[in-house]
């Protein structure tokens, strides 16, 4: 992991990104995140003392707007599902090429969620299998504009892209999303995207 982390730091800094902290374990990651509020957090699934899922859950409890990307060896890692359900924006494989990783970081920094159709369906299936529920049938409370914003969010558009498509300001998008989360009793963008997919507002392609 130290070799991977040092290589990662070099890559990010070569692209003009600033690495403001590295954590040796989940408890350090939680402390760094609480103290520094980074734009994006790259979270290793496997960490000592506090694993990546628990660390992510704790970080998002402190700061629901935190943007966490899970780093994992395996595409079908069950821990990834739990992290995404908790609000992680998605995942990147450890053997992904640098272009894929950098693209993921930039997209998440811009407000997107990295939910491909397979991942979204697997997480929704996991909710069902464990009899855990996203809020039921509340999207009728949303007006037409809010429904469109929710659909675009679920399709992976950033706040800036949504604003451009709907000819409104980013501030308006942020305010509308806050209202949508409140109406639907959701905590974050990932849960909102899953909800929209499940309710057919943004069908899986």
Image: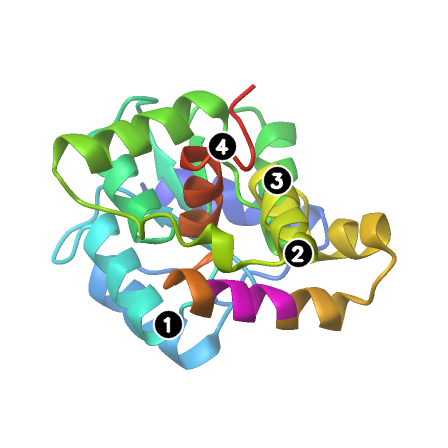
The residue at which mark 2 appears reads as 17
The CA span between labels 2 and 3 is 22 Å
**Alpha-carbon neighbours of circle 2 within 10 Å: few (<14), some, or many (≥20)?**
some
Q: Secondary structure at mark 1?
A: helix
Q: Farthest residue to the front: give it.
A: 140
Start-end of magenta stretch? 176-181
Q: Residue at x 31, y 33 (%)?
A: 123
State which quarter of the image contains the N terminus. Answer: top left
Q: CA distance from mark 1 to mark 4?
A: 38 Å
Q: Earlier in the sequence, mark 3 or mark 1?
A: 1
Element at label 4: loop
> In the image, which disc is placed on residue 9?
none
Residue under the image location 54 percent in, 70 percent down:
178
Give above or below for 52 relative to 99. below
Q: Position of residue 138 (x, y in %)?
A: 41, 54
- Residue picked out by circle 4: 200
Residue 14 at x, y percent in the picture:
69, 47
Residue 102 located left or right of residue 178: right
Q: Earlier in the sequence, mark 1 or mark 4?
A: 1
Mark before the other along the chain sequence, 2 or 4: 2
CB under 8 Å between discs 3 and 1: no
Q: Is residue 21 magenta?
A: no
Kindly indicate whether the residue at mark 4 contacts the one at mark 2 (C-beta within 8 angstroms). no
The residue that mark 1 highlights is 32
Q: Nearer the viewer, residue 69 or 124?
A: 124
């Amino acid at each position: 992991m130290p070799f991977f982390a040092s290589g990662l730091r070099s890559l990010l800094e070569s692209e003009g990104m600033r690495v403001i902290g590295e954590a040796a374990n989940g408890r350090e990651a939680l402390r760094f995140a609480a103290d520094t509020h980074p734009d994006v957090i790259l979270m290793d699934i496997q960490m000592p003392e506090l694993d990546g899922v628990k660390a992510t859950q704790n970080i998002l409890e402190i700061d629901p707007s935190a943007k966490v990307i899970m780093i994992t060896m395996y595409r079908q890692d069950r821990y990834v599902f739990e992290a995404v359900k908790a609000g992680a924006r998605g995942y990147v494989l450890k053997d992904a090429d640098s272009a894929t990783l950098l693209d993921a970081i930039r997209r998440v920094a811009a407000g997107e969620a990295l939910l491909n159709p397979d991942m979204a369906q697997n997480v929704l299936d996991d909710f069902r299998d464990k009899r855990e529920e996203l809020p039921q049938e509340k999207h009728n409370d949303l007006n037409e504009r809010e429904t469109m914003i929710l659909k675009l969010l679920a399709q992976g558009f950033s706040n800036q892209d949504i604003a451009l498509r709907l000819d409104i300001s980013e501030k308006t998008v942020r305010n509308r999303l806050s209202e949508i989360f409140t109406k639907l009793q959701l905590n974050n963008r990932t849960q909102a995207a899953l909800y929209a997919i499940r309710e057919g507002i943004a069908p899986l392609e």
